[in-house]
Amino acid sequence: MPRALVLSLDGREFDVRITKIDREKLYGKVEIEAYDEKGNPAQLLVLAPDGKTLIDKGGTALANVDENGDSISRADLIAVDEDGEKIETVPSSFNETNVLKRSTVEDYVSQLVKSVYVIDALNDADRKYLHDHVSAGLIYNFDFSYRGGIEYDKAFVLGNKSDAFMVVGKPAELEFVKLNQAVDLDPTEEQEVSTEEISFENLT
Amino acid sequence: MPINISNSKRRDAVVALEGLVPRRTVQYLDPHRRPVRTQRLLKTDITHDLTSLMKKRKTPASLANALIKEDPEIDIEEFGMFLMETSRVYVTKKGIVHLVEEQELLYNPDGTLREKRPRKKEPQNINTDIPLKWTGKFIKKNDAVQKFIFTNKKQLVHVNGLTFDFLFEMAKTLHKKDSFLLIRGGEKGDQPVIMNRGGKAYNAFLEGRVKGESYCLILHLSNMELKRPKEVDADAEE
């Protein structure tokens, strides 16, 4: 039985289940098959810098190395913040109550998305309570860590007409760029467009 | 990366399109408090994988014995090699091939095959003679976030004095309207945005923010709607 996540919205606590969704679950997937000139199947592999070593999936690993290139065990790593202070680990969000705080559209769209989940409250009253909030366009956030670790991601809770969702990511390094002067421009013909007019099925 | 984009007056300019990275607040140090970095290493190659090892042995049991006694799965000289610049190649039983025919297999969400067709490798359309089009189609931010997932984003940055004004005006217009602008590619301005040849196609939305004399123009890229899949598994998973 998957663990429930406890959310707290305006003082009301309730259990939800989250289910990860992605493009493949919505629209399917595309796989590539390749054949040489004679029709023999070809496999896509990674060629190492030596020009001869061929590597299949799972043939590489990431290691933490010091200035000399010596590997450092993950257990020996020290996580520090911007001031060089040691960071304490954070617990899994499944082990605590997650208080939803109001957020803005700008904050939400400023994040780099890592994963998306559908939220299902465990009982109908809570489902309606949450959906009444998010379907009205309200956006909430809380600090989220699936398994616990060094740092939280930011989880935004929002909804459409029928469901509530949790979008997890990290804030992007956006930069406001300065300029010298401004010029008035005459706008061309403008029109409001319905979101229904934009196709997603054909983006393969 | 350059991007050729037009404004509401159909004037176009080539400006810079920069990738965005997450705001980093965590650094890792070794036990002597010296910085560490992440490095990709060679773990194993195809001459040491299970299929290759089995070719030399008759039974799984004999392979198991060999794994214990001889370590045939390990190449002491090669494994652990730093992989700096790698490339992707097609390989048949005879070795690397340079000319291949690619087929695309399109599957439905339920896993059934929908279509098989020769692979289409659409060219990129963000920096061609035809600028990306300012469609004049605006979507309120609140509506957009309830409909789409912005799976990728980039920032537009000026490259000279003239393009300061060009981009600032775009940002100002979008900031005032509190809306995203649909951006399209192609001659007719009816194509999704493709960043590189054969790459993913995205619906692209431009957002502008202005703060005093500075601007921030973000190109939000989406290939996914905010909606529940028809056959989503009710079990939670990461």
Image (cartoon, rainbow, N blue to C red):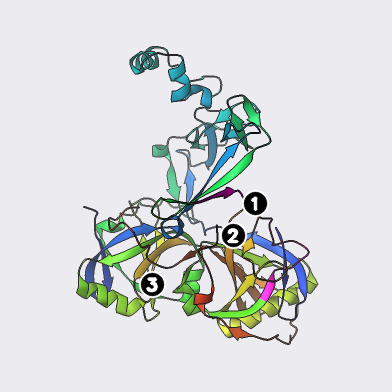
Front-most of B32 and B151? B151
Image quadrant for the C terminus of chain A?
A: bottom right
Secondary structure at numbered mark 2: strand
**Residue A19 occupies quadrant:** bottom left
Q: Which mark is residue A9?
A: none
Give the residue pinned by disc 1: B121
Q: Which region is colored magenta? A: B115-134
Front one among A196 and A178: A196
- Judging depth in this view, the residue of A124 and B109 nearest the camera is B109
**Residue shown at 23%/73% (left/top)?**
A126
Q: Position of residue B61 (x, y in %)?
A: 33, 15
x and y percentages locating residue B135 in the rendered image: 65, 77
Q: Which label's residue is closer to the chain start, 2 or 1?
A: 1
Residue in the picture at 74% in, 73% down = B164
What amino acid is found at the position of numbered circle 1 in the picture?
A: Lys
Q: Residue at x 38, y 54 (%)?
A: B110
Residues at discs 2 and 1 in contact (Cβ within 8 Å): no
10 Å neighbourhood of mark 1: few (<14), some, or many (≥20)?
few
Whether labels 2 and 3 share one chain: no
Q: Is residue B141 above or below residue B85?
A: below
Q: Is residue B69 left or right of residue A201?
A: left
Instruction: Give the residue pinned by disc 3.
Output: A158
A130 to the left or right of A115: left
Badge 3: chain ID: A
Reply above or below: A107 against A193.
above
Query: Where residue A137 appears, x then y in whole percent?
Result: 40, 79
Q: CA distance from mark 3 to mark 1?
A: 35 Å
Secondary structure under badge 3? strand
- Judged left or right of residue A150, residue B43 is right
Q: Which residue is mark 2?
A: B201
Where disc 1 sits, the SS reads loop
Q: Amino acid at mark 3?
A: Leu
